[in-house]
Amino acid sequence: MKSILNYSHHLLEEIIVQGETVIDATCGNGNDTLFLSKLVGEFGEVIAFDIQEQAIDNTDQLLMDNNCTNVSLVLDSHANIENYLIKELEETIGGAIFNLGYLPKSDKTVITEGASTIKAINTILHYLKIGGRIILVVYYGHEGGEEEKNSILKHVISLDQKKYSVLQYGFINQKNNPPFIIAIQKK
């Protein structure tokens, strides 16, 4: 069985093709951004968001260390993704990934929140290609995490099954609120 992070990447590898535009909605330390950069290749584009300057700086350094030049870093909330997408991208975004929670080794009071994440999901769904996926890695073992988890689950469960397939993947015998994946695929 694949770990949560390996499976999240596997779900994106299956559907993203070189040359596409993709989104890292929470770039954090840049690991998913780097993965997406390599996946879309030289002619693709990654748009990576974070609300913390430290996360943007960490990601920028990782990208420079790996000679990645196909990433646009945005210091803003993923709730505002629509402000950075042009009309020509409608129904062409290959995929997106979120790591919910807080930036590792930083201020644990700066967290993702259900309302902003749901707004970002809805925006990306509009721009997503047929067969494209949104991957949410849900870390919820922190203050505010349970509330975000519940609001997101309530939202994705209500998505029209004729338009979207929604998967939940996680290990149920791990202690301390193990992270899990929600994957949404546009039909």
Image (cartoon, helix red, strand yellow):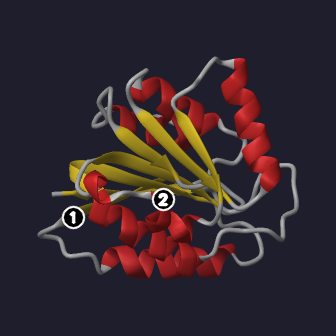
Question: Is the C-beta separation of discs 2 and 1 under 8 Å?
Answer: no
Residue at the image point whose x is 22% and y is 58% from the top: 186
Q: Which mark is residue 142?
A: none
Residue at the image point whose x is 27% and y is 75% from the top: 159
Q: Position of residue 14 (x, y in %)?
A: 29, 33
Regarding residue 80, the answer to whether it shows in the image is: yes
Q: Secondary structure at mark 1?
A: strand
Q: Please give the residue where the numbered disc 1 appears in the rendered image.
A: 164
* Of 143 and 12, the residue lying toward us: 12
Q: Position of residue 88 (x, y in %)?
A: 26, 53
Please tell me in which quadrant of the rendered image residue 115 appears. Answer: bottom right
Q: Secondary structure at mark 2?
A: helix
Q: Residues within 10 Å of mark 2 (few under 14, many from 20)?
A: few
Q: Please give the residue where the numbered disc 2 appears in the rendered image.
A: 84
Quarter containing the C terminus = bottom left
Q: Position of residue 170 (x, y in %)?
A: 49, 53
Please tell me in which quadrant of the rendered image residue 128 appears. Answer: bottom left
Mark 2: which amino acid? Tyr
Q: Position of residue 162 (x, y in %)?
A: 11, 70
Regarding residue 11, the answer to whether it shows in the image is: no
User: In 3D space, how far apart are the residues under numbered discs 2 and 1 (Cα atoms)?
Assistant: 24 Å
Mark 1: which amino acid? Tyr
Residue at the image point whose x is 43% and y is 50% from the top: 96
